[in-house]
Amino acid sequence: MMADQPPPLEATPILNEVPLLPHMVNGDSIQQVILVQVNPGETFTITTEDGHIQCIQGPAHVPMMSPNGSMPPIFVPPGYVSQVVEENGVRKVVVLPHSAEFHPSMHPPPPPPPHVPHYMHHHHALLPHPPHPVYPAVPGTGELPPQFIHQHPPPHVFQEQESDTESKKCDTHLSIGKPVVSDIQARSAVLSWNLPVSSQNGESHSHSPAAFTFEVAISNSGKNGKFKSVYVGEELTITLPDLRPATDYHARVSATSSSIKESISELVSFTTESCEPDCPAAPKLINRTKNSLSLQWKSSNDNGSKITNFLLEWDEGKNGPFKECYYGHLKQYKLNKLSPSTKYSLRLAAKNDIGMSGFSETVTYYTAGIVPPAPAPPVLVEAGVTWLSVRWNPPSGVSSDDPLTYGLDMEEEGSGYGFKPQYNGDELSCTLRNLRRSTSYKFRLFACNSEGKSSPSEVVEHSTNPDKPGPPSKPTVKGKIHSHSVKVTWEPPKDNGGSDISKYFLEISEPSVGSKWDTIYSGSQREHVCDHLKPGTLYRMRVYCVSKGGESQASDVTTVTTSAIPPGTCHAPCLAGKAKPKEITLQWGPPSVDGGSDITEYIVEMANSEQDEHRQVYQGPTSECVVNNLLPGRTYCFWIRAANKVGFGPHSDKAEICTAPGPPDQCCKPLITCKSATCAVVSWEIPSCNGAEISEYRLEWGQVEGSMHILYTGPSQNYEVKGLTPATTYYCRVQAVNAAGVGLFGETGVVTTPASVPAAVSVLHLLEEDQMEISLPLSTCLAIQWEEPCCHGSEITGYNIEYGEKQLVTVGRNTSHVLENLLPDTLYRIRIQAINSFGVGPFSHSIKAKTKPLPPDPPHLECVVFSYQSLKLKWGEGPSRALITNPTQFNLQMEDRFGRFVTVYNGPCHTYKVQRLSESTTYYFKIQAYNDAGEGGFSEVYAFTTTKSPPASLKAPKANQLEENTYEITWEPLQPMKGDSIVYILQLAAGREFDQVYKGPETSFRLANLQTNCEYRIRVCAGRQSQDSTGSQELYGPYSPSTVFSSQKQELVPQGADLMTELAETKKTLREERFIAIVLLCGFAVVAILFAVVIQYFVIK
């Protein structure tokens, strides 16, 4: 079904009721009539130019016009297919149901029903119907082909649907405004229009540009003239190109949509601007003389402004830039005072009131000339056998611009026909072909131009060359063919090429050497004896000749084979590879002269010497043989002879070749004699050397017959074996070696050495402390252990142990022993030997062992630094810090309050500081040293007493002014320390140094007689007085912070005010001094803690 189904209209008139259009019956060959057959029950819908839809119901034949002969698009409902058939030269479109059984090629269209009416529609009304494809426009007519919608509804259903759709479409009206023309130029203009507005049931609707397709058509033949479609698309503004200047145009725009019928705008008229004329045609030549050219031309299109003048330019015959030669309104002009036979180039332009047109094409004309003078005769360039090449020069006094042609006449000698033309053209050379060889020809030359032909040149005569002669006859053998020479003869060629033969050349080639030809004879004779040939060799011979015409081709080849002879002497045979002891391989080359026949075989003869009888050892075709059953190291003589089909050649030179020496024979069983329990002498006999002197002997020796090793290699026939084990069986065998190789081993000899003293102890070592079963004092004892050596045939009874200064101790059959009563910290060398019934064996290797030292004595302990809360102790001589290499450690103990000694330090250092002690208290210490040797005893008990602690620092004293130069100084008191009384020292400073002004137990002091307006500083410290056996002692603490005051003259002010001021200043000073003291105390505390941590980590631990 189609989307748009127009309703059926009234019945249409039949074909004879519609008048035919003029362009349909005028015989126009471009447009063709195509019939659309509408069957009964079908409806054919057409959209007309004014937007109306007409429907034709079948049966009917609708004739449609095709502008270019192509088929218009016909849209059919689903289930149908259109088919084109041709009947009597008229194409017809038939719509049939589409089914699997229907094939258009097999079923002809049904015949039309009788009395079927025809309908014909005007072609201007057949416009495209988007969105279906637009039928292409016909060029030059401004017309578009029709769009067809062929529908095949059932008789009732389709007509109802068509009626509904068509009624909706007819209710919607589309209107488009009049287009606007702007930017009008001479050959273009801009056309624009607005979107169309649709109205339905009195309501207006706007649409987007993409919903419409616009067609622009223009006409330059009036409003009722033919319109030409120039644009189809969706744009609202276009540029009209390719317009004619000064021409009236009419334009219209039509809009189409898929759901709204087409709308056409009003016509808009405009006139293009005028411009300069078109380029005129090139001027034409109407007459010419030697000195003038007459030209004429036509006007071009003036493009709306009348042409007023013409401009004619020429190049003055110099082929240079163009210059003006005429300017005026005339259409012809004559150029005078020109040169004869000269080329002139001209061009033309037209001018009107608007401007000058472009120039026409450039044309070239020549003035008339004179007949050229007679040229020089042609010159021979090159002559051939059947051709002559000649050239000539232009006649003198003729301008190079004057075109000339040349005519060449030729006369053959003795022909009797005279001169005949052979060439006519503008070239200055010519090659004449198909001439007769060795013939003389006469030539003359003419020069021609447009004015006529010159007189002929002088007659000149040239001749063709003679041709090469033909090949001579095939050479033939004359007489008997010898082994080193042959005589050949030949006949002259049948065609000598027009000249006598001057020389013959005989060439010979040996195919076995290559394809090279060698000349062995040249001369006028026609026979030659070829000598110095090789016997039995195939030769090829040929002859060629030479004349004035050149060198002929070679004759046919003659093959000649010389007689063969026996081969020549071979070179003496030589050794191939290396000689073997019992065979040698000989090789040889072929004789230098094979006698002209292939070598068939060789014979090799041998003799022990040159005087001995020769015996044949080889006969065959190869050049190598193997001679067997020879003796090693012998010299043999060899000769060789070669043979061909003629016979044997002579013997070669003698070749003397030696066989290679062979390995020695197997040695005899060696003779073994024991000189002692550890030494034996082995001797053997000399075996057969097999042609080469024995260079060495190899003696294999071992305790197992199947596993012996080479013990001796050398030229001697005996060897003394040392270092044997007593009471042991040994096996040996001997092998001889010479330059040829190694002989076989002889029989194996057996010998048993006699018993002897034991072997040396191989394993001796010192027992460590953890390997001992019982604890021993390692400072005076060493425990050793060893493995029992070989007894050498007699049981071991004991051991001798040597240590120290060759001290010897004998023990029984044990494998360990403890050496006692040794010196501490002493190095000993120890070795051991075994004993059996034959005596004492050798000492073992020495080992070094050192006894450990005795435990160390306790060092002397002393106190180097006393303090009221710590004691720094020192002992022995050594660094204060621990050393890794120090083997001695110390154990420092102190008595606690319960009377027990506890360890306070254990390590390698020689100093230790005991802290956190009480003042004026006695402490008891003892020390012990230990190392790898053990722990030493404790020292005696040492007593060290801490000192008394000094009093604490006092606060800054206070200064109170009593009178004009009198001040009372007061400070805080301290409590007595463990029964000791406290005294105070007060110091005063007026400058840099302090002076003591008071010492005593009081806590105040009055300063008098001070200077007025002077600044003073005061400080105070506490001291501790104690009594001991030495007398009275005083221990002072640190000074307090300084107090600064100034002595001033008293004024008449209330005493209360002075007191308040002085108290405020004193409090301020005290606060500042206390803050400074706290900061310093905190800093010292932090530094002390850091030092304590460092000492504890790096020194004590």
Image (tube, helix red, strand yellow):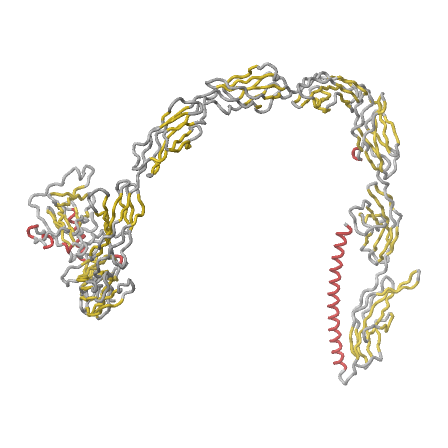
300 w.r.t. 803: above or below: below
Considering depth in this image, is 805 or 141 the residue closer to the camera? Answer: 141
Taking the image as shown, residue 838 lies to the left or right of residue 632, namely: right
Q: Residue furthest bottom?
A: 1052
211 w.r.t. 616: above or below: below
Provide residue 1044's location: percent of width, then percent of height.
78, 74
Taking the image as shown, residue 326 lies to the left or right of residue 753, namely: left
Provide residue 43's location: percent of width, then percent of height.
14, 48
**Number of numbered discs on residues:** 0
Q: Residue furthest front?
A: 525
Taking the spot 22% from the left edge, 63% from the top edge, the residue there is 279
Provide residue 169's location: percent of width, then percent of height.
18, 55
Taking the image as shown, residue 969 lies to the left or right of residue 208, namely: right
Note whether residue 196 is visible: no
Note whether residue 317 is visible: yes
Provide residue 958's location: percent of width, then percent of height.
79, 73
596 w.r.t. 67: above or below: above
The quarter holding residue 625 reads top right
Considering depth in this image, is 59 or 898 the residue closer to the camera? Answer: 59
The quarter holding residue 516 reads top left
Considering depth in this image, is 742 or 765 the residue closer to the camera? Answer: 742
Considering depth in this image, is 556 or 272 the residue closer to the camera? Answer: 556
The quarter holding residue 185 reads bottom left
